[in-house]
Image: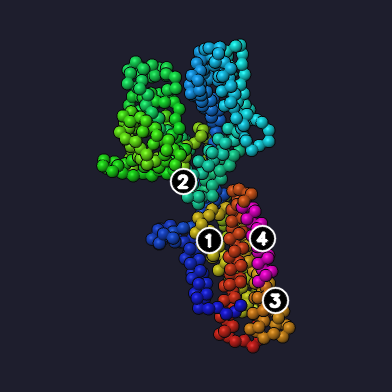
């Protein structure tokens, strides 16, 4: 236990040196950090309660999502009627939160109702029960009504909020290093708190952009001036939609499409291979790449429109089948706007519009008080522990334990900096708790060494036995505490996770410094001093 090969010694010293280099930037000013290597520019992020930041309460427009689902049901019914037997209707429209329709011919009623009822599926196939997505009712001989069930509305609303939270997380914190709070609050709201946020306008822009991308075939009616005039007045042909173009004017396009932003596997900004102007490159997933390849193969010579947030940014002509699953979008992009669009597309489209119901900037004054209080508590704790170790185990072994504790705190700061973790007030509590727990392992080891010395063992044998027999209880105690910290991290959120992170990191570093670093210092002293009696 006391023998360290040259390789092990170098590895331990390099680990401590690396920890020192990673922790050092936290004590330097920003200007000095900028002149240092990239890996030494990372520091511990302070949470909203310590440095202030942005606090927003976002309201999710769930009404529009349900209305869009009704439109989807309408288009799906129209498509099924067209594809399965050419069933004709006198009218088919959304009215008063329902899809209402009337069959033109009496002989189509039975088959048509069978198709509509067949389109109603289980809301959750894995759940117990038979809640369906839609409910079909009839009135008279030819009239029918399709309603979205309450169970399906609840599922849509839950899915919409969950998707909104995930998209916001990818947009605002794409690297995952900012410990922001992003949780559902109430039935239709999302709480967003961003520590250290400075550019609030940029955050609001990211929230408000829907980044809803789709690829749609341009309708033949777009060549008709009369049809375009009617479209501009809101009178569209069945199955058609009208969007304005970025370059001016507008086009009629297919209302339904299978090629949406969900098809994107990846997007990035780039430069046009021949024109030299900014573009946005994209790659479809395997399924949509096949669909897009078939679509372009069937429509050679026709135009398709790239629609972003209800605006056509380009509408090129299909000169050849695009079967590779990748391409690029061109428009009036700058290099910066192309980069921002690619980031938004990678994050995904928001499923619903978000309205900022409440917004405020949190002051950091309370945070400064908390930081100062945390520093004072840490210093007092360190001094108290150091004095106790010197009084209990003498100058030699007390100094070894205190040096191990100092290295432990340094390694915690290094790990938090490397991970880019956010330190909150509960996180400071976790560090202070770690300081109190950090010497537990040393106490176990030293008490065992003292016991072996009292039994008459020589110094080398007493220290060897003390470290060897103390290892099992040290691991048992710290593993159980680590499991508790991991559980807090998995089931908790926000500040609770911050406490769990600092506690877990502190446990790992405490074991390393007590069992490895302190043992190396003890073995080094033992080889050089060769004491006849242990001063413990």
Q: In this view, does 55 lie above or below 302?
A: below
Q: Is mark 3 on a helix, strand or loop?
A: helix
Q: In this view, does 523 lie above or below 160?
A: below
Crowding around mark 1 (Cα neighbors within 10 Å: few <14, some 14 to 19, many 20+) is many
Q: Do the residues labelled 2 and 1 touch (CB within 8 Å)?
A: no
**Cα distance, mark 3 to mark 4?**
22 Å
Q: Mark 2 points at which residue?
A: 198
- At a point 59% along the width and 35% down the height, the residue shown is 158
| Residue 165 among those drawn in magenta | no
Q: What element carries label 4?
A: helix
Crowding around mark 4 (Cα neighbors within 10 Å: few <14, some 14 to 19, many 20+) is some
Q: Mark 4 points at which residue?
A: 481
Residue farthest to the bottom, as pictured: 532
**Cα distance, mark 3 to mark 1?**
31 Å
Which of the two discs, 2 and 4, sits closer to the camera? Answer: 4
Q: Mark 3 points at which residue?
A: 448
User: Along the polypeptide, which appears first: circle 3 or circle 4?
Assistant: 3
Q: Mark 1 points at which residue?
A: 415
User: Along the polypeptide, which appears first: circle 2 or circle 1?
Assistant: 2
- At a point 39% along the width and 41% down the height, the residue shown is 325
Crowding around mark 3 (Cα neighbors within 10 Å: few <14, some 14 to 19, many 20+) is many
The N terminus: image quadrant: bottom right
User: Along the polypeptide, which appears first: circle 1 or circle 4?
Assistant: 1
Q: Where is residue 431 in the image (x, y as percent from the top left)?
A: 60, 60
The C terminus: image quadrant: bottom right
**Cα distance, mark 1 to mark 4?**
19 Å
**Cα distance, mark 2 to mark 3?**
54 Å
Q: Of 42 and 107, which appears nearest the observer?
A: 107
User: Along the polypeptide, which appears first: circle 2 or circle 4?
Assistant: 2
- Residue 89 appears in the figure: yes
């Amino acid at each position: 236990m006391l023998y360290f090969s040259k390789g092990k010694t170098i590895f331990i010293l390099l680990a401590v040196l690396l920890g020192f280099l990673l922790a050092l930037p936290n004590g330097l000013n920003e200007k000095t950090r900028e002149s240092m290597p990239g890996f030494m520019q990372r520091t511990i992020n302070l949470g909203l309660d310590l440095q202030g930041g942005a606090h927003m309460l976002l309201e999710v427009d769930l009404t529009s999502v349900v209305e869009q689902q009704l439109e989807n049901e309408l288009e799906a019914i129209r498509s099924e009627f067209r594809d399965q037997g050419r069933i004709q209707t006198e009218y088919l429209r959304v009215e008063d939160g329902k899809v209402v329709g009337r069959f033109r011919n009496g002989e189509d009623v039975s088959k048509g109702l069978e198709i509509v009822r067949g389109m109603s599926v289980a809301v959750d196939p894995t759940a117990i029960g038979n809640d369906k997505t839609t409910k079909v009712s009839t009135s008279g001989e030819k009239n029918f009504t399709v309603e979205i069930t309450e169970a399906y509305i609840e599922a849509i609303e839950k899915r919409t909020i969950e998707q909104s939270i995930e998209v916001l997380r990818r947009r605002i914190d794409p690297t995952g290093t900012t410990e922001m709070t992003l949780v559902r609050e109430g039935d239709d709201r999302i709480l967003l708190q961003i520590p250290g946020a400075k550019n609030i306008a940029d955050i609001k822009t990211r929230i408000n952009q829907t980044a809803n991308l789709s690829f749609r075939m341009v309708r033949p009616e777009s060549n008709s001036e009369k049809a375009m005039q009617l479209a501009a007045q809101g009178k569209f042909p069945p199955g058609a939609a009208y969007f304005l173009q970025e370059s001016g004017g507008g086009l009629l396009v297919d209302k339904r499409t299978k090629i949406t932003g969900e098809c994107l596997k990846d997007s990035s900004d780039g430069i046009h291979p021949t024109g030299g102007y900014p573009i946005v490159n994209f790659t479809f997933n395997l399924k949509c790449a096949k669909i897009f390849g078939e679509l372009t193969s069937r429509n050679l010579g026709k135009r398709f429109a790239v629609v972003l947030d209800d605006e056509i940014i380009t509408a090129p002509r299909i000169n050849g089948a695009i079967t590779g699953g990748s391409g690029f979008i061109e428009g009036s992009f700058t290099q910066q706007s192309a980069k921002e669009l690619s980031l938004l597309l990678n994050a995904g489209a928001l499923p619903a519009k978000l309205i900022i119901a409440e917004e405020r900037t949190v002051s950091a004054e309370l945070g400064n008080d908390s930081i100062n209080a945390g520093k004072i508590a840490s210093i007092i704790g360190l001094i108290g522990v150091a004095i106790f170790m010197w009084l209990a185990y003498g100058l030699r072994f007390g100094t070894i334990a205190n040096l191990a504790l100092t290295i432990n705190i340094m390694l915690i700061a290094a790990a938090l900096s490397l991970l880019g973790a956010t330190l909150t007030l509960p996180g400071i509590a976790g560090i202070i708790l770690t300081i109190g727990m950090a010497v537990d392992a040393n106490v176990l080891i030293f008490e065992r060494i003292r016991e072996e010395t009292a039994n008459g063992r020589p110094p080398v044998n007493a220290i060897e036995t003390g470290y060897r027999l103390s290892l099992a209880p040290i691991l048992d105690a710290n593993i159980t505490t680590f499991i508790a910290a991991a559980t807090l991290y998995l089931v908790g959120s926000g500040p609770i996770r911050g406490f769990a992170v600092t506690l877990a990191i502190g446990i790992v570093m405490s074991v390393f410094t007590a069992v490895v670093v302190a043992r190396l210092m003890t073995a080094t002293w033992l080889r050089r001093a060769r004491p006849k009696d242990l001063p413990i």
